[in-house]
Amino acid sequence: MPSFNLAKFRNKHFLSLVGNVVMSMFGLLLFGILYKAFSKDDMGTWIYFMATQGLLDSIRNGFLGTATIKFYAGAEKSRASDVLGSVWFLAIAVTGLMCLLNLGVSAFLPIISDFPTIITIKWVGITMLSSLPYSVIFWKLQADERYDTILWMRFINSGSTILSFVVLIYLHQFTLTNALLWNLITNGLTSVVGMVANLGGFQHMRARTKATVMEVLHFGKYSLASSLSSSLLGAVNTYMINFMLGPAAVAVYGVANKLMELVEIPLRSFVGTGISGMAAAFNQNNMHQVKYIMNKYAGMLTWAFIPLAIGTFFLADIPVNILSSGKYAGTEAANIFRILMVIAIFYPIDRFNGVALDVIHQPKVNFYKVQVMLFVKIVGNFVCIYLMHSIYGVPISGAFTVLAGLVFGYIQLRKYMDFSVTGIMSSGWYELRQLGSKVIGKGA
């Protein structure tokens, strides 16, 4: 009888996957609580606030997150201390600048009439400040590949938020203001726990040097552009829906959009697995292997998403009603989920086109691809919402956005690698059949 070895499940790949799954489940649970407790307008305001916070986080993370991993991971002791101190210095400076800008914008509150914007201006600066230590701690833990500790920190952050919201609901004190306040407090709690446990190495800030600060600064400005553009792709829907249709429409769209995070779990996992293999193959000048890995994973996921899209067509109302506690039954949410799942069939090829461009050292082309998609999304959202006078214009615009990115990426990547959509699909089908044969063989 074979023994069960727990150590097999303590590798970094498994822990990273578990972290992604746990965060997605926590996110769905949190949104389920909020959808049950909030009105549509308050829920839309919450989503608007979180989109803005996410956008600012992408600036801070894009600027310093990748740079921390690049310069800190594997560095000798004095160099690592210098890098970490420089990152802390820049993280404080960037967050301080955000707070100053937020304070400056606050002067215009008397002439702003949009409620979600007013709430966001009042709360976003101090919320970013509360999450500053946690962000640096997270970057350092990633560089150290301490995914088990990352998982615990995520448990503390998300678990304490959910617990505080449940208690507020039980005490009949759950309001938008209290939710924002306890979101700030739980961010601060996570930061304090990390600092007390000395997970961030704040004491190294005195070891920083001007040369390393400038080195991190110059590297970060390049990764910032791609990170910010990618985040804008997600946030632009929230902003345009709010200003053109109102916060209640943001809440309706948010139900379907939140459910789409389930699709991101296998997509992120396959990308994480595939990118290292593709990079290794490229570094060995083996373009055939690069193409094979891309075709394999993109094709397998595409075939897997097709039955998911078909199933969603018939069953979309069930997850929508579960997430929203039935409050959004009869709204556009289920149909939007159906449309988004059909579009998701094209995600794997689009995502792996972008990954391949990065792997073969063409990040500028991938950046241009994101810019094309952002332009199409903004113009498409405006035109489709204006013509249809409906929230359905957003997912329809999303179809054109994905198509634009897919075509642009496909044309550009073919300049460097000989592949085709037919090859991707046939390779993916073959790999799925091989996988099925192995599973059936083991079960026999």
Image (spheres, rainbow, N blue to C red):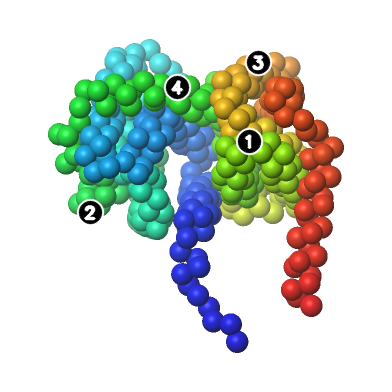
Select label 2 or label 1 by which is in front: 1
Q: Is residue 15 above or below residue 402?
A: below
Quadrant placement of the C terminus: bottom right
Residue beneath label 3, please? 379
Residue beneath label 1, please? 285
The one of 190 and 364 positioned closer to us in this rendering? 364
Residue 144 is at least partly visible in this image: yes
> Crowdedness of circle 2 by 10 Å Cα count: few (<14), some, many (20+)?
few
> What number is the disc on residue 64?
none
Q: Is residue 226 above or below residue 276?
A: above
> Crowdedness of circle 3 by 10 Å Cα count: few (<14), some, many (20+)?
few
Under mark 2, the amino acid is: Ala
Q: Earlier in the sequence, mark 2 or mark 3?
A: 2
Q: Is residue 125 above or below residue 348?
A: above
Residue 358 in the image: state x and y as whole percent: 58, 30
In terms of secondary structure, where does tag 4 sit?
helix
The residues bearing labels 2 and 1 have C-alpha atoms spaced at a distance of 44 Å
- Taking the view exactly as shown, the residue that stands out farthest to the bottom is 1
Q: Earlier in the sequence, mark 1 or mark 3?
A: 1
The one of 331 and 420 positioned closer to us in this rendering? 420
Residue 291 in the image: state x and y as whole percent: 71, 38
Select label 2 or label 4 by which is in front: 4
Left or right side of 149 for 421: right
> Crowdedness of circle 1 by 10 Å Cα count: few (<14), some, many (20+)?
few
Residue beneath label 4, please? 222
Q: Earlier in the sequence, mark 2 or mark 4?
A: 2
Residue beneath label 2, please? 197
Under mark 1, the amino acid is: Asn
Under mark 3, the amino acid is: Val
Q: Earlier in the sequence, mark 1 or mark 4?
A: 4
